Amino acid sequence: MSEWGRVAEDGTVYVKTEDGERAVGSWHAGAPEEGLAHFVRRYEQMATEVQLLEQRLRAGVGDPRQVATSAARLKAQVPAAAAVGDLASLERRVDALVEKTAEAAEAAKAVKAEERVKIAEVKSALAEEAEKLSGSSDWKGAGERLRTLGDDWKKAGQLDKKADDELWQRVAAARKRFTERRTTHFAALEQQREVSKQRKEELVKQAQQLSANVSDKTDFRATADRYKQLMQDWKTAGRAPREVEDSLWQQFKAAQDVFFGFRNQQFAEQDEEFKGNQTLKEEILAEAEALDPAQGLDKAKARLRQLQERWEAVGKVPRDAMRSLEDRMGAVEEKIRDAGAVPARPIESSFTVKLRERIAELEQKLARAQAAGRPTADLEQQLATQREWLVSSGASAGAAPSAGQGGARKPKTTGGWVRSDA
C-alpha cells in the first residue's frame, strides 16, 4: 500500500486520483511492494523532469520555447501516466509551467526583436562606414579598417538571412570600390615614380657635370645659382621608386658637395690672400676717420677722394671683414657729406655701388626667368635680400648716381664682393 496507490491480489496496480482509482498496470514479477515501488519511480522521474524545467525557467537558461515544448509533452502524458504519485498536483505544476513558458517565450521574443533592431543598427552603421571609407585616400588606414570591419560584423550577431545578406552586400561593394581605387592610384603612382626617376637621373647627370668642370676659374656665383635651381627641380620632380630614391639622392648630393667643398676651399685661400689688403684698408680707414670737416670742408673732401682712390686700388678683402670695413668707410663718407650745407652730389661707398649693381643684375635675371616661365622663387629671395642690405646701408632704394656726378665714386671691378651664395 501507498498513499497514492496499491497492488491488488490479481497483480493490478492502481493510482489514486481525485476521481477515484485508475489502473496503471499490473505486476507479477515479485512482491507487491516491489511493483508499487516501480510505478512510484516512474512518477518521480516525471516529477524530476518538471522540477528541472521549473528551474530552467526561473534561471532564464536556454530557449523558453524548448521548455514550452517539454511542458506541453508532459501535459499530455501526466493525466494518463502509468505511474503512482500525486498526479493531480504534478498536472497543476505542469499547467503552471505551460502558462509561464508561454509568457517567457513572448518576453524572449520581444527581447530577440529588440536585439535584432540593435544588430540591424550596428550592421547598418558598419555598412555606412564602409561606404564612406570606399572614397578615402588614406590607403593604409582605410584599408586596415575595411579589413577589421569584418570582425566587428561577426561580433554584431545574426539577422535573418535576407536582411543580413543585403547589408553585407553593401560592405562587400564598398570594399571592392576601395580596392579598385587603390589599385588605380598605386598604378598611376608607380608610373609617376618612373617619370620622377628619369627626371632625377637627368638632374644627377647635370649636377655631376657641373662638379666635374669645377676649377679656380669657375663662376662660383653662377654655378651656385645653377645648383640651387637644380635643387628646386629635384624637390618638384617627385619621389622615384623606393629602391633607387636614396641612391639617386646620394649621387646628387655628392656632386654638390664636390662643388661647394671646392668653392669653400677657394674662398678660404682667397680670404687668406686678402688679409694683406685688409690691413691696408684699415690703415686707409684710420686716415679717413681722422678727417675733420671743421678744419676745412673742401680740403677734407679732396683728401677723402684721394683715400677713396687708394681704397679702390687695394682690391678685395676677406669676406668676413668686407661688410664692417665698408660700413666704416661709409660712415666717413656720410660725415663729410653731412658737413656740407645741401649735398647735391652724395658720395656712395663701393659697397653700396656693388649692391646696386647686383640688384640690377638680379632684376634682369628675374625678368628673363618670368618671360621664359621658369621658377623665380630663388631669384626673388636673393633680390629681396640685396634690397634689404641696400636699405640697411643707409642708401635709398632708387637708382644709383652716375659716376660723373660730383663727389660720387666711380664703381670699380676691384671693389668688395657682394655674393648671394657666399
Image (cartoon, rainbow, N blue to C red):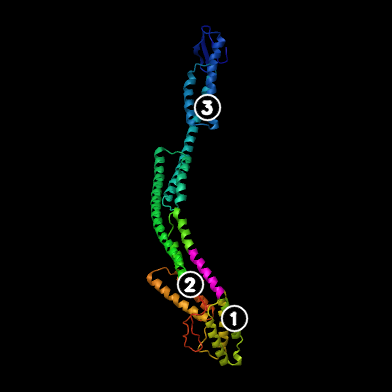
**Sequence-first disc among 3 and 1:** 3
Q: Give the percent coordinates (x, y) of residue 249.
A: 47, 59
Mark 3 crowdedness (10 Å alpha carbons): few <14, some 14-19, many ≥20: many
Q: Residue at x 61, y 83 (%)?
A: 286
Instruction: Kindly identify which numbered label has been placed on residue 382.
Output: 2
Where residue 160 appears, x then y in whole percent?
Answer: 42, 38
Sequence-wise first label, 3 or 2: 3
SS assignment at label 1: helix
Instruction: Give the Cα separation between the discs numbered 3 and 2.
Output: 93 Å
Q: Which mark is residue 53?
A: 3
Q: Residues within 10 Å of mark 1 (few under 14, many from 20)?
A: some
Image side of residue 377 versus residue 36, left or right: left
Q: Which residue is mark 1?
A: 282
On whether residue 261 falls in the magenta region, the answer is: yes
Q: Is residue 153 above or below residue 367?
A: above
User: Between 58 and 190, which is closer to the camera in this rendering?
Assistant: 190
Answer whether residue 204 is visible to the viewer in this image: yes
Residue range of the region highlighted in magenta in the rendering? 256-273
Q: Label 2: few (<14), some or many (≥20) within 10 Å?
A: some
Q: Is residue 224 magenta?
A: no
Q: Is residue 5 visible?
A: no
Which amino acid type corresponds to the residue marked 2 in the rendered image? Gln
What residue sits 59% from the left and 93% below the top? Answer: 296
* Nearest to viewer (mark 1 / mark 2): 1
